[in-house]
Amino acid sequence: MTALYIDLEDQYRYLGWTVGRCSPGRWPDGATALAILESIDGTKRPDDRILAVCVMNEVSGDQCQVHFAADDSRAWSNRNILQGIFAYPFILRGMRRLEARIPADQQKAIIAAIKLGYQIEARLRGSAPDGSDAIVLSMTREECPWIKE
């Protein structure tokens, strides 16, 4: 029986997994990765398969940047996992606002963010890593559909 769980322990492995998926190549100091892992037998092991990673960085008071990277399975995207992912910044870390900047040509990622509850705020011309435009999306604690207070 497989089981999904969220883990913070192996930051080096999890941040490394995002390279080529959503990473700028190297995350700044202080970046925190929450990995969604799949355990084959329900027991946590160091080689459990990574399905997705949520990285939080650029923390400024009660706000931070959020980046998601995932495999193509979508197996990780269920209510329990999403509640855990969003409880971490909003409840455990006391964040008030999350922000995501997604290159404007990555329509699937923008749609996924909107489905998670993010709202489009702006288009930043030339601000994506490759010099193209980026879309700024945000979610406040009050708007988050995944946590209950």
Image (cartoon, rainbow, N blue to C red):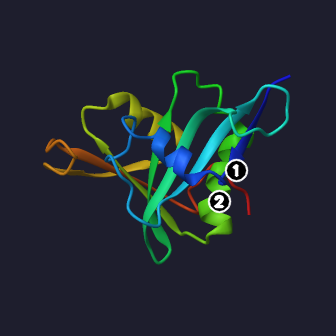
Quadrant in which residue 90 is drawn? bottom right
Residue depicted at x 68% and y 49%: 7
Q: CA distance from mark 1 to mark 2?
A: 6 Å
Looking at the picture, tell me which residue is in the foreground, 42 or 79: 42
Q: Position of residue 141 (x, y in %)?
A: 57, 63
Query: What mark, if any, has residue 88 been given in the picture?
Result: 2
CB atoms at circles 1 and 2 under 8 Å apart?
Answer: yes
Residue depicted at x 22% and y 46%: 129
Looking at the picture, tell me which residue is in the foreground, 54 or 30: 30
Res. 84 in view: yes
Q: Is residue 104 above or below residue 108?
A: below
Q: Extreme bottom residue here?
A: 61
Q: Position of residue 78 (x, y in %)?
A: 69, 34
Q: Quadrant of the C terminus?
A: bottom right
Residue depicted at x 70% and y 46%: 6
Amino acid type, residue under disc 1 in the picture: Gly
Looking at the picture, tell me which residue is in the foreground, 7 or 62: 7
Query: What mark, if any, has residue 84 been given in the picture?
Result: 1
Q: Residues within 10 Å of mark 2 (few under 14, many from 20)?
A: some
Amino acid type, residue under disc 2 in the picture: Tyr
Quadrant in which residue 1 is drawn? top right
Left-right relation of 5 to 22: right
Residue depicted at x 17% and y 41%: 130
Q: Position of residue 116 (x, y in %)?
A: 54, 41
Q: Position of residue 23 (x, y in %)?
A: 37, 45
